[in-house]
Amino acid sequence: MPSSITLPPGYGYVAAGFVCTAWVLGWQALVVGSHRTKSGIKYPQLYAEKAEAAASKEALLFNCAQRSHQNTIEHMPLIILTTLVTAMKYPVFAGYACGFWALSRVLYTLGYTTGDPVKRNTRGGILGEIPLVGLLLGSTYTAFDLLRSSA
């Protein structure tokens, strides 16, 4: 039996936000691959060993690139969930917040791959906390609003 899903007006912004995250993840994977090649760290080794990173700037940069990518992946379930729930009521806001978060991950990665992990947040990466909090609040409000309207 066929069924359909009706998306609220403005849902294209949500799609655009998610596509931005996909491009950022792909770019981060390329950055990691480049640093893996330069450092000589072979698959399946996920990170350079502490001694390798201490002895080689390239190994340290590989670890920083890998960590920035892993951190983005760790955040993805939260971003996907909160964006989708917020988008039920506020799709334009959700799409912009998701896209803004994706942009912040570029800044986070550029800062991290300087080799100084502190710079992951001091070069603009910390700005990603703004849309993250917005999506957490938006999804919480949307969930309560949906519960209230169904009672």
Image: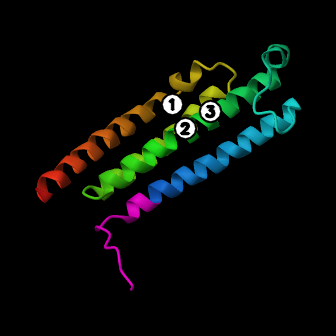
Select label 2 or label 3 by which is in front. 2
Q: CA distance from mark 1 to mark 2?
A: 15 Å
The three-letter code of the residue at mark 3 reads: Ser
Q: CA distance from mark 1 to mark 3?
A: 10 Å
The residue that label 3 is drawn on is 68
- Element on which disc 2 rests: helix
The three-letter code of the residue at mark 1 reads: Gly
The scheme the figure's colours follow is rainbow
Magenta segment includes 3: yes
The three-letter code of the residue at mark 2 reads: Glu
The residue that label 1 is drawn on is 125
Where residue 46 appears, as percent x and y from the top left, is 76, 33
Select label 1 or label 2 by which is in front. 2
Where residue 142 appears, as percent x and y from the top left, is 23, 50
Where residue 65 appears, as percent x and y from the top left, is 69, 32
Which badge, 1 or 2, comes first in the chain's sequence?
Answer: 2
In the displayed structure image, the side of residue 91 where residue 27 appears, left or right: right
Quadrant that contains the C terminus: bottom left
In the rendered view, tell whether residue 18 sits above or below residue 68: below
Residue 128, quarter of the rendered image: top left
Where residue 23 appears, as percent x and y from the top left, is 59, 53
Task: Write the residue at 48% across / 55% down.
Answer: 18
Q: CA distance from mark 2 to mark 3?
A: 10 Å
Which badge, 1 or 3, comes first in the chain's sequence?
Answer: 3
Residue 136, quarter of the rendered image: top left
